[in-house]
Amino acid sequence: MNLKIRLYIIVTLLALGLGVALIKAGFLQLVRGSALKELAERQYSRVTHYSSFRGDIVDRQGRLLATSVGVHSLYAEPRRMNRPDQVAKTLKHAMPSLTNAQLERLSSDRSFVWLARRLDPNISRRIEDLKLDGIGVSQEEQRFYPNHGLLGQTLGFVTIDGQSLGGVERAFERYLKPKSWSALSLQDARNRPIRSYLAPNSEDLWGDQITLTIDRNVQFVAEEVLAQTVRAHGAKGGWAIVMKPKTGEILALANVPLINPNKHEKNSIAKRNNAISRTGEPGSTFKMVTFATAYDLGLIHPEEKIYCEKGKWDLGYMVIKDIIAKEYLTPEEIFKYSSNIGTYKIAQRIGKDKFYEAIKRFGYGELPGLNLLEEARGYVSKPETWGLARFANVSFGYGIMASSLQMALMVSTIANGGVRVPPKILKNIQRANGEVYNPLPEYRPVRVLSEQAAQAMTQIMVSDTESGTGKRAAIAGVKVAGKTGTAEKLSESGRYAKHLNLSSFAGFAPADNPQIVALVTIDEPRGVAFGGYVAAPAWREIVEAALIQEGSVL
C-alpha cells in the first residue's frame, strides 16, 4: 500500500473520529448539558441555608413569656454512606434508644433523613466525636414557655417542625418568624471546604420580639384565683379578663383549666380561649346595656317608681319572673335587685329599633378588634325578627350571643365616660436592631353614651356592690361599680337547665376614677350558682391584685 493511500486512510479515520467526537460533544452539550452541569455543581458546591430563632414574646414589663432555645437533632445522608450496616451498629452502641425502624432509614436511597430529634447534649456530643460518614448533628429551634401554663391558651404554641398553632404565636407569625439566608460554598472531592461565601450575622436573622400589654403578675393572680374558685364550687371551668379602660390594654386573659404549651395537650376543649372565643347568652350583666341606653335617651328618672308585678308578670305569650318579689321600685332598685320585670318595662320605653342600634354601638355582633384569630363575633338578630318574647328576653340578657370580651368592653365603655376604646393586646414589636414599631392600625375611640348617662350608670352599679346582689365584690376603702349575672345554659334537650349556669360578675374600680375593668365567669358551678355568690368574690381578689400591681390604690 503506497504512502498516499495510507495517508488517505489515516485522514479519513481521523475525520470520522473527530466527527464522532463532535457529535458526542454536541450531544453532551446540547442534550445532557444541564444535567451534567448540575451534577458537577453538586459535587463541588453546596448551598448552606442559614436561619436563626423565633422572636421572643414578653409582657408589658419585658418579662419573658415565650422564647426559643437551641437543641440538637440527629440526621443522616444515606447516599453518602459506603457501609450503612456498619454505621447502624456503631450508632446503636452509642445511642441504644434508637429503634430498628430508625436505623433502617440509613439504608434508604434518600439524601436526607431525620433519625432523632431533641437529643440530650451528652449523647449528641458523643455521636459527633465518632465522626461517622453520612451522620450529622444539627442545631434546631425548640420553643420554650418558661412560665409553663401561664397564659397558655392566649400564647398558643409551636410544633416540633416550627408550625405556629393558635394564639399570639399564630396571629403574629409574620413578625415572630426568623429570617432565612442561603450562601454558596465550594469543596474538593473529599468534601473539604475550598471557599465559603460570607454568612450573615445570626442576630440579623432573629424573629422580631413581641411585647404584649399583658402583666405577668396580674395574669398569675387571675389564674390562681380562678382555679381556686373552680375547685371550691366544683365547676367545669372559668375565665377572666382584666383591662385598663382608658387605653383598652388587656392586662390578663385567664382560662381554667390551664394548659402548658410546652406539652401540646391534645385536649382541644382545654386549648380554647374561652375569654375571647366562647359566646353565649350573657344574662343579667347585659342589663347594663338596657339601663345605659334608657339613661342616654332620658327615658328614666332616678326618683320614679316602676311597678314590678310582685315578682311575676304573665304576658300571655310568656311569664317573666324575678328572684326577689317586689312591687314598686326605683330604677336603681330594679338594677340592684336585678329585676327582669322592671328591666323589660324600661326596654319597652326604648323600643326595638333604638335598643338594637344601642346594642350595635356597644360592639355586639362585631369582632372586638384584638387581632387574635380566636376572637368571636357573637350574634344579634335584626329587630324586625323580634317577637314580643324575644324583645323581653334580650332586655335582660337572653336571645343574644356575646363573648366575655364584648361584655368587658361594654363595662369599659361605661367606666371610660361613655367612650368605647378598642381592646389591644399588642404593645409593640421590636426588631433585632432595636427599632420599635406597631404594624396594627390605630382605631379611634367612639362615643357610645353621653357622659351624663355613663355617670348615672356608674352610680347604680355602685349601689349593686354596696347593698345589692354584688356585695361580695366590694373592696374595703375603694368604691366598686359592677353587676352580677347568672345565665342558664341550654341542656342537650334544647331547654334551659336550672343546674347548668354561667355565673359572672363584671365591673370596674375605683368607681370615681376607673383604673381597672374586669369580668369573671365561672362555668357550671354546683350548688348555689348566683353570680354574686360565685364570681363576685373572685372578681374582688383579682381586681385588688391588679390595683396594687398598677400602683393605683391600696
Image (cartoon, rainbow, N blue to C red):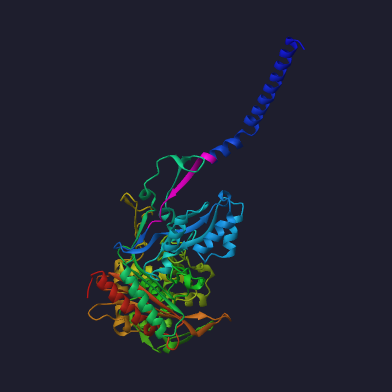
> Whole-percent x and y of residue 293?
38, 70
Whether residue 236 is visible to the viewer of this picture, yes or no, is yes
| Residue 44 counted in the magenta span | yes
Q: Name the residue: 38% across, 78% down.
A: 226
> Whole-percent x and y of residue 360?
43, 65
Viewport quadrant of the C terminus: bottom left
Q: Nearer the viewer, residue 134 or 454?
A: 134
| Residue 301 counted in the magenta span | no
Q: Is residue 187 left or right of residue 435?
A: right
499 over 70 or under it: above or below:
below
159 over 403 or under it: above or below:
above
> Whole-percent x and y of residue 419?
33, 64
> Which residue is most to the front?
1
Q: Nearer the viewer, residue 334 or 367?
A: 367
Whether residue 351 is visible to the viewer of this picture, yes or no, is no
229 over 73 or under it: above or below:
below
Q: Nearer the viewer, residue 327 or 194?
A: 194
What is the number of callouts on the image?
0
| Magenta segment boundaries in residue numbering | 43-55
Name which quarter of the figure residue 457 lies in: bottom left
Q: Is residue 244 left or right of residue 394?
A: left
> Which residue is most to the right?
1
Q: Name the residue: 58% across, 39% down.
A: 39
Q: Name the residue: 57% across, 60% down.
A: 103
> Whole-percent x and y of residue 57?
37, 60
Viewport quadrant of the N terminus: top right
Q: Nearer the viewer, residue 8 or 237?
A: 8
